[in-house]
Image (tube, helix red, strand yellow):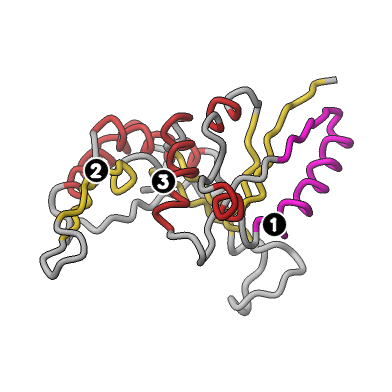
Amino acid sequence: MTSYRIAVIAGDGIGKETIPAATEVLALAAEQGGFRCELTELPWGCDYYLQAGRMMDPDGVDRLLTFDAIYLGAIGDPRVADHISAQELILPLRRRLGQYVNLRPMKLMPGISSPLAGRSAADIDMICVRENSEGEYCGLGGRLHNGTPQELAEQTAVFTRHGIERIARYAFKVAQTRPRKMLASATKSNALQHSMVLWDTVVDEVRKDYPGVSF
């Protein structure tokens, strides 16, 4: 029987509610699917930061690399600044693991009430594909004159042809598997006339390789 070693990080807030329920579902899926899941719970997150002064152990990333998968709940707590929780846990994982895709399926499930009145489960079934390692996530920038009236901060968003093309191709391949084979690219190129225009240009070039997808 195939066995998978999974690191479980419930994290903060809603993660501590959803992950226990989700692992029950995972256990049932494993039972019915004929595989095993060896779960290792790791206490990292904002509560851990408030106790230990760090979001995860110093060798956290190396330890996580020994697992087959990471099941992450949610990271963030009003008691810990967002830039700390992100820079010390989420972003190091994204960078080290090359997690450039942020995939967010959206479906209306049967039997669930929704504010979108009059819709059925067949009407709402989308997937959001977000680039996850470039742009503002590059972490380039800095602050000057801290604590003075002249204090300033600079955050540089970096986009590369390579990064844009790989996420675009991923999105088009996902769209090829969808019932309607449709893809929309959302940018702010009216204001970001360099980075987002490059994005639009590259995506427009990539789409020619996927004629079966309505773009």
Say left or right for 59 vs 171: right
The circle drawn on residue 16 is: 1
Foreground: 40 or 128?
40
Q: Main secondary structure of the magenta part?
A: helix
Say left or right for 11 vs 161: right
To which residue does mark 3 refer?
87
Q: Quadrant of residue 26?
A: top right
Which of the two discs, 3 and 1, labels the residue nearer the N terminus? 1
Say left or right for 115 vs 95: right
Q: CA distance from mark 3 to mark 1?
A: 21 Å
- Judge the density around disc 1: few (<14), some (14-19), many (≥20) Cα neighbours within 10 Å: some
Give the residue type at disc 3.
Gln
Residue drawn at (70%, 62%), measured in percent from left and top? 109
Which of the two discs, 2 and 3, labels the residue nearer the N terminus? 3
Residue 71 at x, y percent in the picture: 65, 41
Q: Can you say whether 96 is above or below 79 in the image?
A: above
- Judge the density around disc 3: few (<14), some (14-19), many (≥20) Cα neighbours within 10 Å: some
The answer to whether the residues at label 3 and label 1 have Cβ atoms under 8 Å apart is no
Give the residue type at disc 2.
Leu
Foreground: 52 or 111?
52
Residue drawn at (62%, 62%), measured in percent from left and top? 13
Q: Can you say whether 120 is above or below 143 in the image?
A: below
Residue found at the far right of this picture: 31
Whether residue 32 is in magenta: the answer is: yes
Residue 87 at x, y percent in the picture: 41, 46
Q: Which residues are magenta?
A: 15-41
Residue drawn at (25%, 36%), measured in percent from left and top? 205
Say left or right for 54 vs 208: right
The circle drawn on residue 140 is: 2
Which of the two discs, 1 and 2, labels the residue nearer the N terminus? 1
Q: CA distance from mark 1 to mark 2?
A: 32 Å
